[in-house]
Image (cartoon, helix red, strand yellow):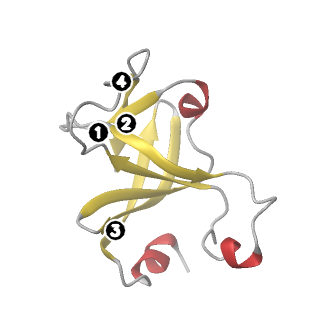
Amino acid sequence: MNVVEWLEGFDTTSNVAPVTLTIGKATWQGAVYTEAGRVSYYLIGDRPASHRRARVCYRLPDDERDWFIACYIDDFTNLTESQNTYHPFGNNWVMKCWDCDGSIDEYAEKPYKRMKATLT
């Protein structure tokens, strides 16, 4: 089973399609999907190094909105067997669009770094 097939198996997801996301020189395979009217990207592998070093969000081509890492998993040490079933592809992360009032960094000490990301 691939990530598209897996996401299509949930009653809450729709419009699932394969995607490749590139940030800098790093590339991730995954899928784009809609859930509760919101577009999300499920990406396989470790989260971007830029996310581990600083407050950062991402900009997609022709999209001025900020995209952020909403959740990630890169350590399975304390997960139960039941929890592991939700991560069949190992390390992964989910990117969502900031769609709240105000900017993502409105109340942050420093502005977030905004990095370009591309989709194919």
**Residue placed at 23% from the left, 37% from the top?**
65
Could you tell me how far apart the alpha carbons at marks 2 and 3 are, in whole angstroms? 18 Å
The Cα–Cα distance between marks 3 and 1, rounded to whole angstroms, is 17 Å
- Name the spot of residue 82 as percent of width and height, x first: 70, 79
Element at label 1: loop
Q: Which residue is mark 3?
A: 17
How far apart, in angstroms, are the residues tagged by discs 1 and 2? Answer: 5 Å
Mark 4, other Cα within 10 Å: few <14 / some 14–19 / many ≥20: few
User: Looking at this view, is 27 or 102 the one in front?
Assistant: 102
For marks 2 and 4, the one nearer the N-term is 4
Q: Which residue is mark 1?
A: 60
Which of the marked residues, 1 or 4, is nearer the chain's N terminus?
1
The amino acid at mark 3 is Ala
Q: Which residue is mark 4?
A: 107
Among the two numbered marks 4 and 3 on one chain, the one whose residue lies closer to the N terminus: 3
Name the residue at 81% across, 58% down: 77
Q: CA distance from mark 2 to mark 4?
A: 24 Å
